[in-house]
Image: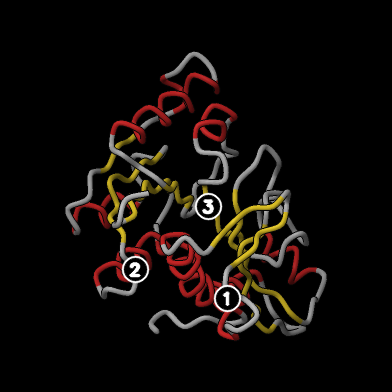
Amino acid sequence: MSETLILGVLASGRGSNFQSIIDSIDSGFLNAKISALITDNPEAYAIKRAGKHGIEALVIKPRDFSDRNAYYSHIAGELKKRGVELVVLAGFMRVVGKALIDEYRNKIMNIHPALLPSFPGLHGQKQAADYSVKISGCTVHFVDEGMDTGPIIIQAAAPAYHDDTEETLSERILKQEHKIFPYAIKLYSEGRISVEGRKVAIKGYRENSVMINPPLQT
């Protein structure tokens, strides 16, 4: 791994987590460089965010490839050409294919708006609100072949209320997402993360209470 961690970001929508990573780099909190944004959506607002910060944006659409394996093989190739060391899924609304996972095993991070293993898949916030949970939150995890089943890196809690809607709970969770995603990337860049089976060990975890609710800046 290089001294400055080289990131590749995949996003499908507005890219608010993408922006939180950019801001963490610009502030000096995170020693990393975003080599490229890859999106499957030519209308994604994340493209505009990339343009504002001089980040290359590539639109790669699945329909332009013969099958799913060819699509993700192409993405893996584009990332490798740009020296990407860690792939970050910031609202990428597709299940990642095996070709990309094999190329970046335990080097693909995703953020999910629920406390996994509860409420995997789409609309985790709606599921939590429908069940009237009392505590919700978000999870950063490594990506494997399953649906939000990869090793959990870090989580943050957010309160949930009986009158929450998907929208109100999502807004509360998103604030925590913007904190823990850059923090998880920082831990990786510092070589503090190791994967043991499906468990993630973090050097200094027991002494570091901010793991429960880490600040954006430290």
Asked if 146 appears above or below 15 in the picture, the reply is above
Give residue 8's position: percent from left, percent from top: 37, 46
Under circle 3, the secondary element is strand
The residue identified by callout 3 is 109
Give residue 44's position: percent from left, percent from top: 36, 48
Q: Quadrant of residue 17?
A: bottom left
Amino acid type at circle 1 is Gly
Q: Tell me, for residue 30, which label it has, or none.
A: 2
Under circle 2, the secondary element is loop
Question: Which of disc 3 and disc 2 is earlier in sequence?
Answer: 2
Asked if 44 appears above or below 98 in the picture, the reply is below
Verify CB contact (< 8 Å) between mark 2 and mark 3.
no
The residue identified by callout 1 is 204
Amino acid type at circle 2 is Leu
Give residue 202's position: percent from left, percent from top: 60, 67
Disc 1 from disc 2: Cα separation? 18 Å
Under circle 1, the secondary element is loop
Question: Which of disc 2 and disc 1 is earlier in sequence?
Answer: 2
Location of the C terminus by quadrant is bottom left
Name the residue: 64% across, 53% down: 195
**Coloring scheme used:** secondary structure
